[in-house]
Amino acid sequence: MRSRIHILIAVLVCGFSVMPARAQTAAPAGVVVSGVIVDQSAGVIPGAAVTLLGQAGAMRSTTSQADGTFSVDGVAPGAYVLRVELSGFETYQKPIAVTQEPSPPLKIAMRVATLETDVTVEADESADTFSTSNSSGETMRMDSEFRSALPIVADFFMGVVTNFFYPGAQGAQGASLVVDGIEGDQIEVPSAAIGTVRLNRNPYSALYQHPGQARLEVSTKRGRRSRYDGILEMANRSTLFAARNAFATTTQDLKRGLVQPTFGGPLPGKKSSFFFTGQRHIHDESGIVNAETLSGPVIANVPTGHDHTSIFSRLQAWPSDLNTFIVSYGFSGHDFSNRDAGGFNLAERGIAAEKHKHTLTFSHRLLRASQWQNDFLFGLINNEDHAGAAATAPAIDVSDAFSSGPSPTFTRATRQSFTLENTARYLGHTGHAFSFGARLRSDRVDAFDASNFAGTYEFADLKSYAAGTPLFFRINRGDPNAAFNLYGANGYVQDEVRVRPQLTLTFGLRYDWQSMVNDKKNLAPRFAFAYAPENHKKTILRGGVGIFNDDLPRSAVERSLLVDGIRLREVVIADPSFPAPFSSGADVTPAPSKVSIAPNIHSPSLSEASVSIEREISHRNWITAEYAWFRGTHLFRSRNVNAPFPVTDVRPDQNFLNINQVESTAFMRSQALTVTWRGRVGKIFQPYAQYVLSKTTDNTSGMFVIPANSYDLRPETGPSDADARHRFNMMGVLTLPRGFQTGLVLSVTSGRPYDITTGLDDNNDTLANDRPAGVTRNTGRGPGFAQLDLRLIKSIAVVHVDDAAQRQRRNAIELMVDVFNALNRTNVVAIVGDMSSPFFGRGNVAAMARSVQFSLRYTFRR
């Protein structure tokens, strides 16, 4: 591992210090006209066509670079008209006078076009083709108009986009979500607040901690300075048009409603704007219980509820052409009723839960005359979670048959996060796009976990339950409170160098630090290139290599502080009496169990290397083929370091029963071949399709999952839980005559693996996860998944304006019908691998059957 870092650092040093010098050529006679092109928010605009028109008809043209700069050499003194054009922006045109004296760089601010009719799902077409930060064929870019044409409803946006994530690139806490520069694990803003979404942009960027294949970048909307925009959207889904779930006997109750108002525009003075949106999403449906009890099968629809309320507001000010200030506030509240009911959990296991999140951010962008751009970000986040209540009686779990009694879950947590970030970029004319930055983060966590204070009986099968002979009784005792602080910091430096017009190299170095991990050698060097072997630039070869370090999740720290064997003790009794576990003379103060973090724990490291060929097969149609290789080391897993020795059945530390230690000893190997098609079929169809052939092997199913034998980890090596050999995903919008549109989302994957166990505890480690002799982890393979969602849209213009200059003053109504799981295919969620279960080899939970939703969206512009 360290040798790989040293090699990559050496490459970076060579790149920064001995970059091949460009050949010196005689400067053409004349004057240099240069400048930088920005949008209304002072963001740089690459790819704009810049033209100088002389009085005698002479014309000189160029294109703005990745940093927004442009330069026209050898311009003779005289009067010219400077014209800047780019799709989606108003054409900029201004007379300029060129003299013999060198003039300072121009700053050109372009306005967004007032009429936006094109729907796009693509990489930034304006971006520099040969920049390593942009791939025309592979980077997915969705704007709000394309997204609104897809059958995606509010809270389910992430479920669609994550289909395009590569599982092998995800970290310990899943995919990386970046909303307006702040990393998190969920998108909590209303769907109407989401402006642009990008996936797999600049996969080796040193700015980010995680690779692009598992990183989603979201930019929220802002109010315009030129007009007022508003949207009112309403949606309804009911049982009337819903199909019956495959595991239910009757159609489940279903009522989903959405109300989402949006409004934004200029504030007095035209130097500031506002944006506001709110969302109320009600999910009243049913959890489907599919279990087996002593009385026989239990199949029932249990009413469940989930209400989601969210708001997002944003103020943006431009006190000058070089300054932009943004203040935003967001709130997200989730309220659940009968959560967890369904599957093997009977109705009484449902709990109430709440999740509330407040987010406040402040950012400032400054563009200096010296061509430096500085971005400052400050963020505050407050999370409050509540789940369950104190149980009044022990719970009963019969392994993969049924779970009854009150839920043992009873948790509360409050977390305050503080983020401070600053990034600087150089936008000069030296052929370098240089940037560096740093981020500080502080988390304060106050946790309360009184789960399982009433205890839980665990039975191996229905026969044991009928005989009243449980395998174990578990109960927690002690103080359920814990509070702690976490601190983190990172910094990066990166240089994107245009070596030749058709060759770009990017060198980056990143460092990550976390207070709870003693491993301080977390350097992450990265390198990427983009090269066009042909002069016509239709084919581009891209590649890169890099190291990505991960953090220790807060949940590991929280559990180790709570269940430490002193403050809170987990008591496990094997072969207890039932229903009174201590009545048979069992020790009333047995040795406790605890959770700990290994003292030598390391930060997980993911190494990635990839190479791709991108080809523009026709106008605005790209095919990309990429091979990627991933290697994960020091991944998190848990191991019972106090399990009984295989021969003597004696535990190493007699003061404790189990010591579940979080370690960084797991690994992952993955490789994938990805083919992506993005573009347009005429003016009718706009697709983004991706096929992935992959194989992922690892030796852990999660940070808190204990292996079958903690002293022999070789059988744990097997297919990853998310190892689907074939995956095909497609999104597309079909434009039809008379104001109709059809959007589709298609997802098809081959089966994922599942573990096969006996349901017994033959090695006396108090876990019934032993496997049959010779069977390794994830030997089974489940069925595939396929789902097609469709949306039909009819647009009606309320006000028709013939004058093109006034078309921005328009109102429109869109009537929408969505059909989810249009083919009504049964998609089993998981396969039961417990050989003692009556459900062994089959599933008991399926994804939602076909349902139909009706929506109305009213849009106005003033």
Image (cartoon, grey):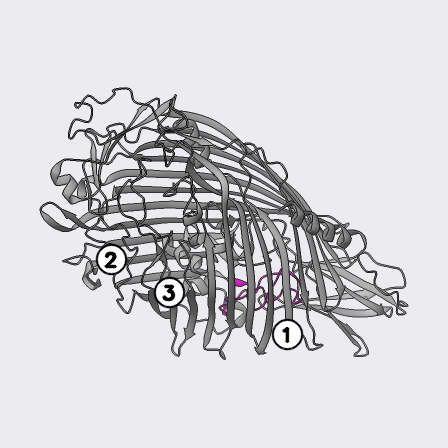
Three-letter amino acid code of the residue under disc 3: Ser
Image coordinates of residue 436 in percent, x first then y, are: 69, 46
Q: Is residue 231 visible?
A: yes
Which residue matches tag 2? 842
Asked if residue 227 lies left or right of residue 648, the reply is right
Q: Is residue 382 visible?
A: no
On whether residue 132 falls in the magenta region, the answer is yes
SS under mark 1: strand
Which residue matches tag 3? 750
Crowding around mark 1 (Cα neighbors within 10 Å: few <14, some 14 to 19, many 20+) is some
Image coordinates of residue 127 in percent, x first then y, are: 63, 64
Tag 2 near tag 3, CB within 8 Å = no
* Disc 2 to disc 3, C-alpha distance: 16 Å
Image coordinates of residue 5 in percent, x first then y, are: 66, 48
* Mark nearer the N terminus (2 vs 3): 3
* Image quadrant assignment for residue 653: top left
In magenta, the rendered stretch is 111-140
* Residue 706 image label: none
SS under mark 3: loop
Which residue matches tag 1? 539
The mark closer to the camera, 3 or 1, is: 3
The mark closer to the camera, 1 or 2, is: 2
Q: Nearer the viewer, residue 753 or 560?
A: 753
* Mark nearer the N terminus (1 vs 2): 1
